[in-house]
Amino acid sequence: MIESTIDKGLDKEFVGSLIPQKFPFVMVDKLYTYTETSLVSGFTIDENALFFQNGNFKESGIIEHMAQSVALHTGYQFYLRQEQAPTGYIGSIKDIVINELPKLHDEIQTTVSILQEFAGVTLVDVVTKLNNVEIAKGQMKTVLAK
């Protein structure tokens, strides 16, 4: 099993190269840990963040951060195998609960736990924390493009 722990998070540009989204639509800037079945990512909210409005990072930004964290898992998995990562799409979002909105300069961290993976379809649990306090959670199903 491939496992990787990164002490301070990987370089923002490198992390950005692992996902299909490009500025200003990038909502992940750190990769802290990776295993074949999990990942912990991070994102620091700045004033240029696409979903930052009226002092808060909006719900849609948190959901997009969660989805990009799933994409980051796939991207890093393919990077380790020295293969080009395919583009993926959100197939469904289920049971999303958002309890708090991050503020300017807050860093959110999301844990992606893969529940099931079959034929390019991946079901994951996602939990987003701010200062080690859970602020959002839910499930997503992603589909790889053929």
Image (cartoon, rainbow, N blue to C red):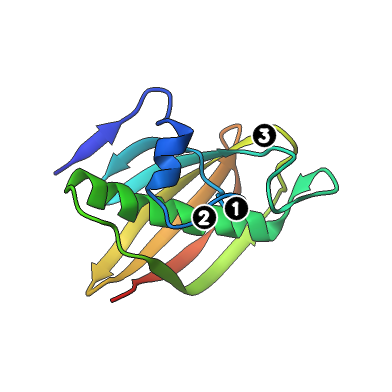
Identify the residue under disc 2.
66
Please name the residue shown 21% across and 44% down the image. 80
Three-letter code for the amino acid on which mark 2 is drawn: Met
Identify the residue under disc 3.
106
Three-letter code for the amino acid on which mark 3 is drawn: Asp
Q: Mark 3 or mark 2: which comes first in sequence?
A: 2
Residue 98, image x, y percentages: 66, 56
Q: Is residue 110 above or below residue 88?
A: above
Please name the residue shown 66% across and 39% down the image. 45
Residue count near mark 2 (Cα–Cα under 10 Å), binned few <14, some 14–19, many ≥20? many
Q: Answer yes or no: is residue 83 visible.
A: yes
Q: Closer to the camera, 29 or 42?
A: 29
Q: Secondary structure at mark 2?
A: helix
Distance from the alpha carbon under mark 3 to that under mark 2 = 16 Å
Three-letter code for the amino acid on which mark 1 is drawn: Ala
Residue 53, image x, y percentages: 80, 50
Residue 73, image x, y percentages: 34, 51
Q: Is residue 70 left or right of residue 24?
A: left
Checking the image for residue 136, the label placed there is 1
